Image (spheres, rainbow, N blue to C red):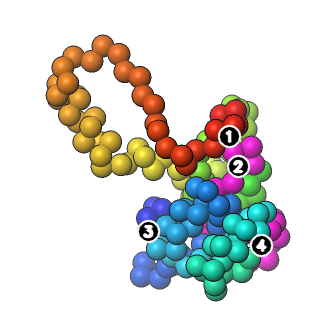
Amino acid sequence: SAYGFADSKNPVEKLNFACIGVGGKGSGDTDDAGEAGNIVALCDVDENHLNKKAAKFPKAKKYNDYRKMLEERKDIDAVVVATPDWTHRDVDIAVLEMGKHIYAEKPLALNIADCKMIHSTAKQAKGIMQVGFQLRHDANRHAAEKFIHSGGIGKVLMCHGIRHGSDLPRRIPW
């Protein structure tokens, strides 16, 4: 699938996805998961985000609490997590402990101790974990890198990059 999950299901059979955090970045992640598999559950604490995404995936059951969703839904194969960064540790670990595959948005966590905790849980988990670094695979970015490395702009002495876009939260400390 687009999320790189291997599963014991028939290769033609689509995975059942649950999406936790379906506003902002999670909205696009949910749409992508919907192309790769079946969206069976949606979870968000914001009713507006939840209802908007549920209109696109009407067969998915809506939840406001990811713990309740994970407890109730035994048909979930994989979970896409796009919650605020300060929630990543708890949500990611809960998904991994349930034995589900997980695509987790970056940053992995806000400190090294939490990253180690998630990593340790992922190593012991039944499911596969992938952390979102989608721009790393962007064709335009790769073409620009190839051009620069081939000497296309001359010898590079220093590089400073800025990403311009309105999709990132601006008032949080990450």
- Which element type, helix, strand or loop, lies under badge 4? strand
* Along the line of sight, the residue nearer the viewer: 136 or 11: 136
Q: Amino acid at mark 3?
A: Ser
Cα separation, mark 2 vs mark 1, equals 10 Å
Asked whether the residues under the numbered discs 3 and 1 touch, taking CB atoms below 8 Å apart as contact, a structural biologist would say no
Packing grade of label 1 (10 A; few <14, some 14-19, many >=20) is many
Residue located farthest toward the top when viewing the structure as drawn = 157
Q: Which residue is mark 1?
A: 109
Q: Amino acid at mark 2?
A: Pro
Cα separation, mark 4 vs mark 1, equals 24 Å
> In the image, residue 152 lies at what x, y percent?
17, 28
Q: Which residue is mark 2?
A: 84
Cα separation, mark 3 vs mark 2, equals 25 Å
Packing grade of label 2 (10 A; few <14, some 14-19, many >=20) is some
Q: Which residue is mark 3?
A: 1
Q: Amino acid at mark 4?
A: Tyr
> In the image, residue 64 lies at what x, y percent?
80, 68
Q: Which residue is mark 4?
A: 63
Residue located farthest toward the bottom when viewing the structure as drawn = 59
Q: Let me know if residue 167 is in the magenta part.
A: no
Q: Amino acid at mark 1?
A: Ala
Work out whether residue 163 can be spotted: yes
Cα separation, mark 4 vs mark 3, equals 25 Å
- Which element type, helix, strand or loop, lies under badge 3? loop
Please tell me which of labels 3 and 1 falls first in the chain.
Answer: 3
What residue span does the magenta drawing correspond to?
A: 63-88
Asked whether the residues under the numbered discs 4 and 2 touch, taking CB atoms below 8 Å apart as contact, a structural biologist would say no
